[in-house]
Amino acid sequence: MKPTPILDDNACYQAVLDRDRTQDGKFVTAVRTTGIYCRPSCPARTPKRENVTFYRTPAEAEAAGFRPCKRCSPNTQAFEADLAEQICRYIDAHLDQRLSLDQLGSVVVISPQHLQRMFKRTLGISPREYIAARRLDHLKTRLKAGDTVTEALYDAGFSSSSRLYENAPEKLGMTPADYKSGAQGLAIRYTIAPSSLGYVLAAATNKGICAVMLDDEPDTMVEKLHDEFHGAHITADSDSLREPLDGVLAYIEGQQPHLELPLDIRGTAFQQRVWQALQAIPYGETRTYSEIAEAMGQPEATRAVASAIANNHIAVVIPCHRVIRQDGTMGGYKWGLARKQALLQREHEQA
């Protein structure tokens, strides 16, 4: 077990003077005259040097009789969130390196075992899963930017191509070469129509609907479609998409509670499982992110579920608007919170 590191009091107090947010999660400042401990970045009045003591963790400060500041909330949960943020920043900056728990633990001066538990408790995924996800995101970005598959693989920190290619359909929904092509050669048709929630774009391949978007500006949606399927041959076609578009419009207006359309869903295996779980939510009902994760048998994957929902390109048909926060508030919505609220209200009235 690693010994508790010795804090440099002068450096700690300078961080308090500077309200240095980068030091949040590395120590807390306990003020003897008030009996309160704070983050280094706390916006409250700076205490005098002779009145403060520095502790590595909130637990140490509380064991010494101090209570958390209500203004900056430096309690254990917030402290661990700061630590997790530091680790995430370090991972993002060192994706091209081999990253072990020992190395990550040395960054925030905690044991590998503590880091593993704390990180998963805070983010819902392990450091290893976060590293894999960020490397995959970086790979996708580099492939879209035009890098060769080999260049993108090694720039993203993958030590070899064999293992990635072996699992590529699960991770990317296709091989890296196919992803780089941006659906190269795929024929996509789209059409746009106005609705009470703004304009609606419906796009389809010969297999089914691949995108439904909502926006106030038609051109913005067309740009997003080209960006997501940058290698595809995309054309406007109102005639062949009239029936599915009419179904989407009727659904939006609350005239058709059940919408079944053939879909061409492109995503990772996990994303597709999340999207299937969304389609299982009954009309007029909602679920929380954690309830979706639990229904999938992965209660610890709440944040991963939220990420998959944010990457849903088929609005309304895959009803991500039915997912809300644990406290009952709306949460986010890719197409705007006003639209989410309107959709839920209409479903509630028609259910």
Image (tube, rainbow, N blue to C red):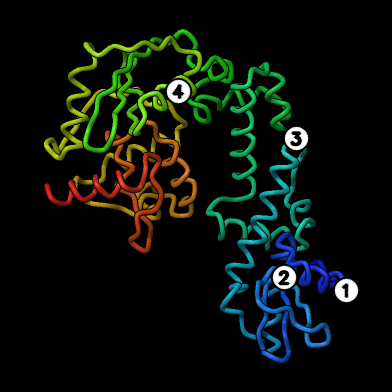
Residue in view at x 54 percent, y 20 percent? 179
List the single residue furthest toward the bottom. Answer: 33
Give the mark nearer the N terminus: 1 vs 3.
Answer: 1
Alpha-carbon span between mark 1 and mark 4: 53 Å
Real-space Cα separation, disc 2 to disc 4, in angstroms: 44 Å
> Circle 4 sits on which residue?
223
Sequence-first tag of 2 and 4: 2
| Residue nearer the viewer, 155 or 36 | 36
Is the residue under label 4 in contact with that under label 2 (CB below 8 Å)?
no
Residue 124, above or below 137: below
Indicate which disc, 3 or 4, sits on the residue closer to the N terminus: 3
Q: Amino acid at mark 1?
A: Asn
Q: Is residue 335 left or right of residue 81?
A: left
Q: Amino acid at mark 3?
A: Asp
Relative to residue 75, is residue 338 depicted above or below? above
Residue type, mark 2 in image = Pro
Q: Which of pointers 2 and 3 indicates the residue nearer the eye?
A: 2
> Does the residue at mark 1 contact the one at mark 4 (Cβ under 8 Å)?
no
What crowding class fits label 1: few (fewer than 14 Cα within 10 Å), some (14-19), or many (20 or more)? few
Residue pointed to by mark 2: 40
Give SS at disc 1.
Answer: helix
The residue identified by callout 3 is 96
Q: Secondary structure at mark 3?
A: loop
Question: Mark 1 — residue?
Answer: 10
Question: Disc 1 to disc 2, how far (Cα)?
Answer: 13 Å
Q: Earlier in the sequence, mark 1 or mark 4?
A: 1
